[in-house]
Image (cartoon, rainbow, N blue to C red):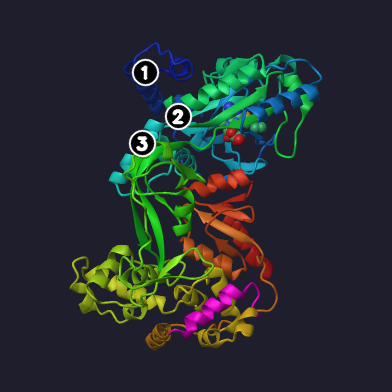
Amino acid sequence: MPGEEAKKRIEELRNELNYHNYRYYVLDQPEISDAEYDRLYQELVALEEKHPELITADSPTQRVGAAPAAGFQSVEHRVPLLSLNNAFNEQDLREFDRRIQRLTGEGQPEYVAELKIDGLTVALTYQDGVFVQGATRGDGIRGEEISANIKTIRTVPLRLRRAPSGLLLIRGEVFMQKQDFAELNQEREASGELLFANPRNAAAGSLRQLDPKVTAARRLDAFFYDILWWEENEREGPATQWEALQLLKEWGLKTNPLSQFCASIEEVIAFCQQWQEKRFTLPYEIDGIVIKLNSLLLQAQTGFTAKAPRAKIAFKFPAEEVETKVRDIIISVGRTGALTPLALLEPVRVAGSTVSRATLHNEDFIREKGIRIGDPVLIRKAGDVIPEVVRVVTERRTGKEREFVMPESCPVCGSSVYREPGEAVVRCQGSSCPAQLRELLLHFASREAMNIEGLGPAIINLLMEKGLVSDPADLYRLTYENLIELERFGDKSARNLLAALERSKETPLPRLLYALGIRHVGAEVARKLAEHFRSLDRILTATLEELLAVPEVGATIAESVQRYAREERNRKLVERLRAVGLNFTLDEVEEDRPLPLAGETFVLTGTLESMTRSAAEEELRKLGAKTTSSVSRKTSYLVVGAEPGSKYQKALDLGVKILSEAEFLQLLEETKRSTD
Ligand code: IVH
C-alpha cells in the first residue's frame, strides 16, 4: 500500500477502534463482536508494522509501552488533589446541608450523589484531547507520574471524542472488579505468590508496577468524576456537577451510571441508605457515597477547609458486621509464654475476605463480652484487617453453649500458668515449653533480629522434632551431617543454612540484644541500650538506676531486663552464645554529632529493586533514621517499592510523604554527601 493510502487507512482504523472502545467501555453498548474488533485491531497492527513512522503515542496499539528507566518521577499537580470530610450518619448529612444553605444564602440546594469507589485516585491530563499524563494522588500536592501504566487501562481513552481544546485535568478512580481480584489471587496462589488483601490493594499494586506489561495483564478499570481544571472552562464549561458528568461521558471517559441527581438532602439520605444495604450486590467495592453540591459556581464560592472542599462530603458506610458462630476457643502460646485465646469461627465473608478466626485477647475480654463456646456472635474487621468480636447475639443462644475456662496449665507443655497481678495476660511458667521455644527461635532468626536466611517455621519445627535444638545457641552447633540427614535438606540447602548461620555471628549488638526476646525490649529499645552500654555484659549487670538513666527506658523495661538477667536458664543461654562467638560488644566508633536523619521515621513497603529491605533499613539506621513497620501520623516518609501493601494507602490517607525508590536513593545520596 502506498504511503498516503496507508496513512488514510491507519487514521480510519484508529477512529473506528476508538469509537468501538467508547461503545464498549463507556456506553456499555457494543455494536460489533470481539472478533470483529480484533480483526480491525490486527489490521492496524500490521499497517503500523509496515509504516513505523506513522505510529503515534495515542494509537490504540500503543497501550503497552516500555518501563520507565529509573522508577516513577514525582510530579506536581497543577491543581491540588484535596480529600473529603466525612459524614457517618443522617444527622451529619443534615448538618452538611444546613451549612451549605448558610454559606450560599440560597434556598434548597441541589446535589449529586455518587458511589464512592474504593480504589485509587488518579489525575489525567489531556492536551487538545490527547492523553499526555497520568499521575497518582500522592500527598495531594505531588504525585507519581504513572502514564505508561494508566495507558494500559482500556477504559482510559488515549484520545478524547470531540477533542476539547487546551489543557484538561480529570480526576477519577482506578479500581479492580471483585471477580478480577478473585481470579488474580487464585492465579497468585497457584504460583505461590503473596495474595492481595483486597481489590484496592490489588489495584494499587498493579498500578504501581514499574513494568507496564504487568499492569496490562491485570484487569484494571476506572470511573471519572471531576473536571479538575480546563483551560476553556470559562467559555464553554459546565455549570453543574451533573452537566460535568454528562460532558465527561461525551468525551469518552467512563462515568458511573449509578450517580444520581438529588433535589434535596432527603433524596441524598435515601440514596445513601439504599446503597448501604445494596452495596454488596455491586461488582466492585464501594466504601461510601460522595455528595457534591450541584452548582459549580456555588462550589467555588463555598471554598475549602484545610484539606477538603466545603461543598462535598463523603458519607462513610459503617464497618460491615456479620453473624457467625464460635465453634471453639483455643489457646495459642507466644514467645513470652503468653496464652492468647482465639475464637475458631464458622468461616464467613466480611468486608471482602473469608474469616475463620478472631482474637479474643485475654480472659477479661471473654468475660466482659460474655463469650461462650458455641455462641452466635457478630464480628467485624477492625482497622480493615484483624477481625474482632463485637458482641454475642444472646437472643439467638440455644442453651447448648459452654462456658470457656482458661486452662490452669500450658496446653503445649503442661507447665503451670501464672497471671501477674494487675496484668490481663496469663503466662506459661515452663522453662522448656516447646511453643515458647518455637516462637523464640522464629524471633531469633527473623530479619530484624539475627536475620538467618532460610530458617523459617518449617525448618524450625523439623529441628525441634529431631531434638537438634533446644535453645538458640544450639543453632550454631548444627553440622552438615546433622542437616543432610533431614528430609528437607539437600547438599546445597544444608550448606546455605550453615553459611547463613555463620554470617549471622557478625550481627551487631543491638540486633543480638533484640534477638534474645527480652519482654518489652523491642528493636528500638535494644538499640538504645546497646548504644548506651556498648556491651551485653554491662546491660545484663546494670543496676536499676543505670538502666533508668538510658533515655526512653522506664521502669517496665528496666525491670524486665533485670528479671531476664536473673534467670538461670537465660544466663546459661548467654554463656552458650558467647562461646559460639557472637558479637557481645558495640565497637564501631560513633560520632558525637547528631546524625543527619536523626528524628526521622521511615517505613518501607513493597519490593525495592536496587537493594534488599534490610540493606535499606541498615542504610537509614546508619544515617540516624528510625525504621518502623507500620505507618502512623508520626511517620516522616513511606518508601514505596513495587507491589506495595496496605501501608501505601494508609500513608495516602494520613498524608504521609511518599518516596518512590528513585527519590529514596536520591535522598540517601544527598544525605550522605551532606555529611562528607
Ligand atoms: S470526589 C475533593 N467522587 O474518595 C475531593 N471522590 O475520601 C474530591 N472517591 O480521594 C473527591 N469515588 O479517591 C470523589 N465519586 C467520587 C469518588 C471519590 C471515590 C475517593 C477518592 C477520594 C476519596 C475521598
The quarter holding residue 496 reads bottom left
**Which residue is more in the foreground, 215 or 311?**
311
Residue 171 in sight: no
Which span is picked out in magenta? 549-567
- What SS does tag 2 mark? loop
Residue annotated with mark 1: 37
At mark 3, the secondary structure is helix
Quadrant (top left/top right/bottom left/bottom right) for the N terminus: top left
Q: Which disc number belongs to residue 446?
A: none
Q: In this view, does 309 lie to the left or right of 483?
A: right
Q: Does the residue labelled 1 lie within 8 Å of ligand 1?
A: no
Residue at coordinates 50% horizontally, 79% vertically from top-left? 509
Instruction: Give the farthest residue toward the right.
Output: 105
Q: Where is residue 90 in the image (x, y as percent from the top left)?
A: 63, 27
Query: What residue does disc 3 label?
Result: 182
Q: What residue type is labelled 2?
A: Tyr
Question: Is residue 554 covered in magenta?
Answer: yes
> Which of the image's four quarters has the C terminus?
bottom right
Residue found at the far front of this picture: 399
Of 125 and 599, nearer the camera is 599
Q: Name the residue under label 2.
A: 284
Asked if residue 334 can be seen in this view, the reply is yes
Badge 1 element: helix
Q: Residue at x 57, y 74 (%)?
A: 557
Name the side, left or right, on which 345 lies relative to 289.
left
Label 3 or label 1, whichever comes before in sequence order: 1
